[in-house]
Amino acid sequence: MQFEKPEFFYLLLALIIPVLVHLFQLRRFKVQEFTNVAALQKIIIENRHSRVIKKWLVLILRVLAITSIILAFTKPFTNKYDSKVDSAEIVIYIDNSFSMEARGDSGPLLKQAVQNILTSSIPIEKISVFTNTKTYRNRRLKELKQELLDIKYSSNQLSVNNALIKGNNLFDKSKKNKRYLIYISDFQRHKDDLKITKDSSYELILLPKRPVKNLNNYIEKIQVKNNQNNYELEVFAKKSSNNIDPLSISLYNKSKLIGKTLVENSKDYKTTFTIDNSKSFLGKFVLDDNGLIYDNDFYFNITKTNKIDVLGLGDSEPNYLSKIFTDDKFLYEFSKLKNLDYSKIQQKDLVIISEPKNLSKTLINNLKSFLNSGGTVIFIPAVDGKINNYNEFLEHEKVSFKKLINNEKKITGIEFDHPIFKKAFKRNVSNFNYPKVKTYYEVSTSAKSLLSFEGDKPFLIQKRRLFFFTAAIELKNSDFTNSPLIVTALYAIGKSSFKNSNLYYDLGTKNELDFKHKLKNNSVVKLISDDEIFVPNQMYKNSKLKITFEDLPTHPGHYALCENNDTLQLISFNHNRNESLLHYHNLEYSKSYKIVNSIENSMESIKSEVLIDGLWKWFVIFAILFLVLELLILKIFE
């Protein structure tokens, strides 16, 4: 026999009370003289014996009644299984993503779920609990209380399948247990459909949490347009319901209120703020909203960016390069190969080799060194180029040209999901005039192409920081230079060759930032804010500092990139808005899982399958029986 609430055994101390009452309940008899003393003595002796028997019987029955009542409160149970089975094992997943900030019947969904767990009747001594960020394995619920109450909201969100895998790994496979995984979440709908595959090693119990109202407004993104004398800040906000109320949006520079506006109702709210572009701007938009809290503030900063250094190389300068790499974003120059100052290569961010017939050994070595130091190279072959000479350079990236193919091909394929094109196209384009080439090189490479010919033959390929075309693009061989695709491709590659600071970055995603600065005495830079300070991943080469951040920082806000006490750059971070749209999966009953509406129901379901929980009723019956017997004894001996 086991007990669900053994703490009630402390009440057994109450048994001392009736025992003490019995021991000290002594009556003094008053002496009364009678003539027939012998007869009276016999009556007194018999009366005393009956009273003693009565008291002991009453005491025993009362003790048994109190003991039975206390045992009933401890909720005794026994396993339904034989001794070879170690009862049950319970793992609970609590979704602590930001969407669980939404309010339920008695507060935020996350806090409500935690409180329900703490007050539920869990039929086993130890459980395992995990969230998107924390794991507590094989712990008593009392030990977990404070840790569960301290769970913070997180932008990290486990997919359903990853959560199930993690939960399954928490089960003790060495024991022959009946296993239960309780999944507590709002089951927010994202891009992926909810697909749950049945696992026979455990039973899955889903506990969906839903807010009272699906009300949430949020700032999705901002954009900046730089006019002659000012910046135009475009703010895009969204809502998750049909609420018709206008939105109040305020703009701050540091802590100073710059402006405030009411945006009238529409499906997607949009408004514009105009500010002076002569100074840097450490901005924050604040949305007045009673929905989720995490997405009401939006941090950004506007600072002066570095122009990207671009060097064009070739036997002659093509006219399209200077039109693409304009002086508002780039510092472009062209040098003929015969007049090249090789020291310039290491000073550049992007080197474009435009249709040379031959590459010198010195140039090849300098280009390899440039690639190794993090530089970006675009290579465009000539129709009559020397293949063996090209391959001396391309072998550095395990790429080689095989032979020239004299066959006209259209350029029909665009890899829209490639990082270079992801932001360049708002949507997939299919109906455009396909440019074509008359000849192209057959190549040997495992790299994926950004642009491809019909038949999926590669036209533009990326291998690490090397981008190379498989065909000449001069007008004699191709009309590609007359296509908008050349502007999109080369401009996007140029922008990626030096990562200037963005308006803002999303927390929890991998981001890179380049900075032109000479560090002092091998020092390191730090990111500093009011909430945290840390040293980001950094690489320093050729007076260029490359900063990478992914898991850190963890708090939204403004950060200063500092070397010692000098601030080099200001960077802003926000939580992504993946959790802001309150749309949910409609769970349907399935053989793969059970659906319950409360944690208590899930525990009752487990008890009904694993435990016999009716023993407490027998102890209540015994208590009543003992009390009835006590009344009968008191009546009989009256």
Image (cartoon, rainbow, N blue to C red):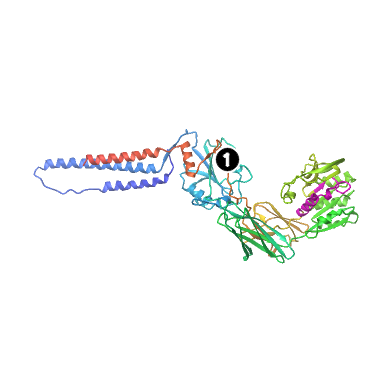
Look at the numbered disc 1 and give the secondary structure of its residue: helix
The quarter of the picture where the C terminus appears is: top left
**Residue 617: within the magenta?**
no
Residue 564 falls in image quadrant: bottom right
Q: Residue 414: image x %, image y %? A: 76, 45
Residue 403 falls in image quadrant: top right
**Which region of the structure is painted magenta?**
467-496
Task: Give the residue at the far left of this rendering.
Answer: 35
In the depicted structure, whether residue 22 falls above or below residue 203: below
Q: In screen coordinates, is 525 left or right of 129? A: right
Q: Residue at x 50, y 37 (%)?
A: 86
Q: Residue 594: image x %, image y %? A: 53, 39
Q: In screen coordinates, is 241 left or right of 69? A: right
Q: Residue 43: image x %, image y %? A: 15, 41
Q: In screen coordinates, is 525 left or right of 607? A: right
Looking at this view, is 52 or 423 the one in front? 423
Give the residue type that dot 1 points to.
Asn
From the image, tell me which residue sits under label 1: 168
Looking at this view, is 470 or 175 the one in front? 470
Q: Residue at x 30, y 41 (%)?
A: 627
Looking at this view, is 148 or 106 the one in front? 106
